[in-house]
Amino acid sequence: MADNDTDQEDRTLPPSEKRLADARADGRIARSRHLTSFLLLAGTLAGIAAYTPQAVSGLRELLANGLTLNANDARDTAELTARLESASAGGLLIAAPILGLLWVGSALVPLIQGGLIFTSKPFTPDFNRLNPATGIARIVSVDSLAELGKTVAVALLVGGAALASLYALRESAAGLATLPLVAALGASGQAIADSLWSVIGVFAVIAILDVTHERHRYMKSLRMTPEEAKREAKEQDGDPHVKARIRQAQREISRRRMMAAVPKADVVVTNPTHYAVALSYDDASAGAPRIVAMGRGPIALKIREIAAEAGVARLEAPPLARALYRHGELGAEIPAALFQAVAQVLAYVYQLRRHRRGEAPAPVVPAAIVVPPGLDSGPDPEPVA
């Protein structure tokens, strides 16, 4: 008991959505027995009230047929047996709607509280329940004592309401004997219905309190310790160390793929050692040049090294290199604001290629590539790859 109390004291966090879903999958939901009783009783009484005219008419006809006898019928045993069987069948037919209402209500009321749940968990053998010590602990637990006290209180309240209703009818009950049979039946039914409505009123209050209590107890039983919450978060989100290794592997793959695209680039724009951005342009397409590789620091040095080995043209344009790195995206077209600046770079590259083929004189290296104000300043984004 002490260990359980200590464990409950440690459970300070509300249950997570996953814990609630797991509890529901196991068939554990907050159910109120008194709400079930209230809904069944109220629904049945409402059905009786709606069905009373037809029931009274049926009973009147049943009594008229059953009690109308002549001398020959009274002496005929077979006739009396047939009439008894007919009266029994008629009584069942009259009671059938009420019985059907009770059956449907008993099936639907649990669905109102928890919905449809299909689980085999309650049928799974639990050998801990065979342990006498565990059974005794359950019997003498605080929850069991509270449940016993609640049951006694409900019995006293409902019984008191029923006795109070019957006591109020003590004077009119004697007058029922002076009424005709059909009228006496109607008056008795009305008196019983009035008593039941009083009991239902008490049940309504009990059901509201019980639903609140059961909901609180259910949520309390599913509360979590900080350690459980951390463990569940780790299970859902994954181990941070494993995720870090996965991200590292993904970055390495992306870096290798990026470096493999550098030899196919048209030009590498640098600044002069901090940044490097490799651009590629397809004459056949109608799109703008694309960034196929970009990086700073050691990655920028690696891009320049691969570009030099592959014979890719390189142009030092610090403002443009910074602007492309800070505002461009790997694999995407260059920003529209940098079209004019990149066009100057590509024009120089194409002239350089013609010169290398001996088709034109050596081009003049652009003295300054101008970019729109503000694009080459500001904080750097997260390192690529």
Image (tube, rainbow, N blue to C red):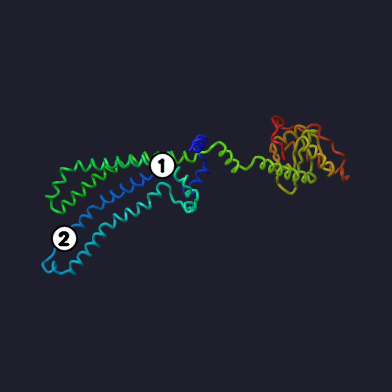
Q: Secondary structure at mark 1?
A: helix
Residue 256 appears anywhere in the view: yes
Q: Which residue is mark 1?
A: 144
Q: Please, what is the three-letter code of the amino acid marked with disc 2?
A: Ala
Q: Residue at x 28, y 49 (%)?
A: 45
Pick the residue in front: 54 or 8: 8
User: Can you say which quadrant of the picture contains the C terminus?
Assistant: top right
- Give percent across and percent down for residue 178: 11, 50
Asked if residue 75 lies left or right of residue 195, the reply is left
Asked if residue 262 lies left or right of residue 155, the reply is right
Q: Which residue is mark 2?
A: 64
Q: In this rendering, which labeled residue sits more in front, label 1 or label 2?
A: 1
Q: Earlier in the sequence, mark 1 or mark 2?
A: 2
Pick the residue in front: 134 or 183: 134
Asked if residue 82 lies left or right of residue 331, the reply is left
Mark pair 1, 2: CA separation: 54 Å
- Give percent across and percent down for residue 69: 13, 64
Pick the residue in front: 14 or 57: 14
Q: Please, what is the three-letter code of the amino acid marked with disc 1?
A: Ser
Q: Residue at x 75, y 32 (%)?
A: 319
Q: Secondary structure at mark 2?
A: helix
Residue at the far front: name it. Answer: 132
Q: Residue at x 74, y 36 (%)?
A: 341
Q: Give the number of callouts.
A: 2
- Give percent across and percent down for residue 21: 50, 46
Place residue 200 in its image quadrant. top left
Q: Is residue 63 above or below residue 323?
A: below
Residue at the far right: name it. Answer: 358
- Give percent across and percent down for residue 207: 35, 42
Q: Residue at x 24, y 59 (%)?
A: 91
Asked if residue 334 lies left or right of residue 47, the reply is right
